Image (cartoon, rainbow, N blue to C red):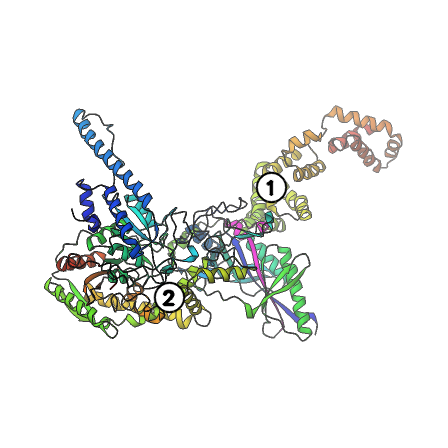
Amino acid sequence: MDNITNLTVHELVEKLKSNELTSEEITKAYIDRINDKEKDVGAFVTLTTDDAEKKAAEIDKKRNANAQMHKEDTKANVESQANSENPVCNDELSEFAGIPIGIKDNLCTKGVKTTCSSKMLENFVSPYDATVVEKLNKEGIISLGKLNMDEFAMGSSTENSAIKITHNPWDLNRVPGGSSGGSAAAVAGDLVPWALGSDTGGSIREPAAFCGVVGLKPTYGLVSRYGLVAFASSLDQVGPITKDVKDCAMLLNIIAGHDEKDSTSYNVEKKDYTKNLEKGLTGIKIGVPKEFFGEGINIEVKEQLEKAIETYKKLGATVEETTLNVAKASLAAYYIIACAEASSNLGRFDGIRYGYRAKDYTTLKELYVNSRTEGFGNEVKRRIILGTYVLSSGYYDAYYKKAQKVRTYVKNEFNKAFSKYDVLLTPVSPSTAFKIGEKCNNPLEMYLADICTVSINIASVPAISLPCGVDSNGMPVGMQLIGNRFEEEKILNVAYKFEQEIKFRENHKPSFKNK
Amino acid sequence: MAVEDYELIVGLEVHAELSTKTKIFCSCPTEFGAEPNTHICPVCMALPGALPVLNEKVVEYAVKAGLATNCEISKDSKNDRKNYFYPDLPKSYQISQFDKPLCNHGYIEIEDDNGNPKKIRILRIHIEEDAGKLNHNEFGAGTLVDLNRAGVPLIEIVSEPDFRSTGEVDRYLKKLKSILQYIDVSDCKMQEGSFRADVNVSVHKKGEPFGTRTEMKNINSFKSITRLIDYEKERQIYELEHGNTIEQETRRWDDLEGRTFSMRNKEDSQDYRYFPEPDLVAIKLSDEYIENIRKELPEMPESRKERYMNKYGLSEKDSNSITSSKYLSDFFEKAGEIANDYKSVCNWLNSDIARILNEKEMEPEEIPFTAEELAEMVTLINKGTISTSIGKKVLDELFENPKSPSKIIEEKGWVQISDKSAIKEVVLKVLAENAQSVADYKAGKDRALGFLVGQAMKQTKGKANPKMLNEMFIEELKK
């Protein structure tokens, strides 16, 4: 049999169904893989493999018991059909029961540390589960651990983690992207079959692109944010990072849906996102906004995307160049809105009730200042200062209010585009994964890594990132497909058909080498 | 220049805790007085990842308050964050309302110092959350944070600077408190801090623009408010008369010293960095929603007053004082109904009970006995079981050690003697002991009768039925 950890989740589900594999076998295979490769990748902040093994054994036991009961049920039914008090299996297991997962370390997990890769929360254990984590638990999905990220999700390379550096499995000298770098690297390195990430300005899509995996930023409000440690409340969304598009649709099925605990989550009809994957692309209109291919976009990235456009034409879609002049304005608005909200959201880390508290202080002010000075990293401080500044009296109108106007403008521009096109096709990032340390001392250049992704969060629309080829260094190139609000089904379909056509996973594998 | 040349200008920001069962953004109970940190959850203690969900009752209560104070209700409102660091504020921001409050442009009508009607304009009413409480030095462990109160819903009622005297301020606060109690949105218990005010004071020479104001925050006693305004007015006039200027600042009121002290001035004033709360959606209200609340508003003091005058024959003055407090008014109606004697209940409430409350500095809510107990006492008097003077003693007892009045008079042996033979026995004894007075009475000195009755009362320790006593003496003296 093919290596277990190389299988997609939908393949694993089939093997569980047909009894070719047990949850324990799957979980153990992943634990072996982690033992082998984690030292090279550094994707995990916390491992919960011991607990995972126990859970897998329990689920196998339950699955066997259920199978047994089913058999007896059938027998009992045959023997006495009049008996209405037959024991019913109300402890039915979901098809995902016993499938492992990795969880970004900004999603609260009861009893397991949630650090946000920050010294501030280094020892913080949440007393409750995030809604999405609750949903995973309900399915019987087993967490292998918590995944590294840029501190408080601020960054594009996971180098801002206060815990460790995560390496890109395709080239260990390169970054995995960020902020969900641990999640993307773990999926790419087969350390987990799938993972949850979060995306505020590209934090799922950029690392997915850098690591050659699939990542989806859902429509704002499709997935509950309850228990996601807030970075920028009006932009944050939880989403899947997976090996392929079908897994992505399946994980979205599990996590999407209205939550009474999140007022900004929408009450939209529950959909099966796997249903339309196979649909043909004839009649689909794809717009290619030329502004996303301008200055600053690496030539090799452009080449791969041009090939992708040809593939789509071959698949029967109509592809047209169009205009959508939002990227630059969005990036400016993004850094104002995100920092403003972050400056307020991160105020609760004051050393009073939980989290890091400085050892030396004599006054209340010193307690605050010292705890926050010592507990936060540079990038977090930079954004808190920026956010505090743009909200200050006298500057609010010039920055925050103007950024909100830009936001309305960007939304309108997307609306216009979606009146003509089903999906929009762009690069995810101007470049492929860069070298560790390369952009550390240049925050502005690091911010430009988000140029193709932030407008999607600003407009609250969904977008998927999937690999479309590799550059001359063998590093994956990502393609972004953007849909209208709540049209995840459409972008998943368009992504799936492409994936089936180019078969990226079959042709390219991470090397785990220092190139 | 003389003090009379200055005019006092006062504006008030009143914070009233709403009496919803649960907090404004989570389902923790709002109940006062629980063990520290027992009414808390991830939301109100601001754990990472927790999100607020607006309690719809809070909106309903605030709309009620707005309608009862003649406000326009905004159909498109929102929440904002007010950012500042303090250990009692777990999120480091208070969710409040900044530029789009729920209610705008209302008024409350009061009387000015000359008894003429005056409208005090209300600028706005907005909803917000209360902060936690800091317990200093308790348990000898520095300062401890209690978050039970964090997230208890408040409305802030902001008046225009329309007050020109402490009398106006006092009448406005009492009226506002009574309105909030009538519509049942706040218990306004000042001693528990559920009704408190920020007071803005300035003075200016008549005919000139308003002066610079100072602010005294979180004052939870009517008496302190009038005292601090008087003090602050005098202080500001003194400063101005001595060629100094008034700083715009927040001052601390020291109730013991009866003075205000400078706390912080404009230079280090907080920049709250208000911005729209991204975790909550806009508050959109329909006309229908607002009209339904309007229809369900309870009977207000004005209309109760009319009813008391027309139906129970109370004077306007009596009706006014009874309706000044919803608690008192409800108490009155209940006791009046049970005793079937509204007039007597009113007299007791407005004379003896009012006097005792005043002496003890108690609010009507703190009356230690029930309406049923007062009604029973009135009935005992009406039935002749006790006299009015015994009634006063029973009332004192009700304040000290409340229990059923019939039990009190039984235990104390205060039952009125209305037995004819017992009365006769006393009368004959007094007549025999006071031959001189009998002679005086027979000689036409009517006053002697009073003396004899007094003696009989003394011997029965006030328990003899005075009417019967009187009649019996006259009858016996005729013989």
Whole-percent x and y of residue A178? 31, 61
Instruction: Tell if the residue under mark 1 belongs to the same chain as the one under mark 2.
Output: no
- Check whether the beta carbons of the residues at disc 1 and disc 2 lie within 8 A of each other: no
Q: Nearer the viewer, mark 1 or mark 2?
A: 2
Chain bearing mark 1: B
User: Quick check: can you spot residue B76?
Assistant: yes
Q: Return the residue at label 1.
A: B342
Q: How far apart, in angstroms, are the residues tagged by discs 1 and 2?
A: 64 Å
Question: The C terminus of chain A is located in which quarter?
Answer: bottom left
Whole-percent x and y of residue A413? 26, 69
- Please name the amino acid that badge 2 sits on: Ile
Query: Which residue is nearer to you in this view: A96 or B150?
Result: A96
Chain bearing mark 2: A
Query: Which residue is nearer to you in this view: B34 or B435?
Result: B34
User: Does residue B207 appear left or right of residue A153 in this picture?
Assistant: right
User: Does residue B306 appear left or right of residue A428 in this picture?
Assistant: right
Label 2 environment density (alpha carbons within 10 Å; few <14, some 14–19, many ≥20): many
A483 lies above or below B45: below
Whole-percent x and y of residue A161? 37, 60
Query: Which residue is nearer to you in this view: A439 or A206?
Result: A439
Q: Return the residue at label 2.
A: A337
Q: In the figure, residue A211 lies in which quadrant?
A: bottom left
Q: In the figure, residue A463 lies in which quadrant?
A: bottom left
Instruction: Tell me if residue B379 is in the magenta stretch.
Output: no
Query: Which residue is nearer to you in this view: A213 or A332?
Result: A213
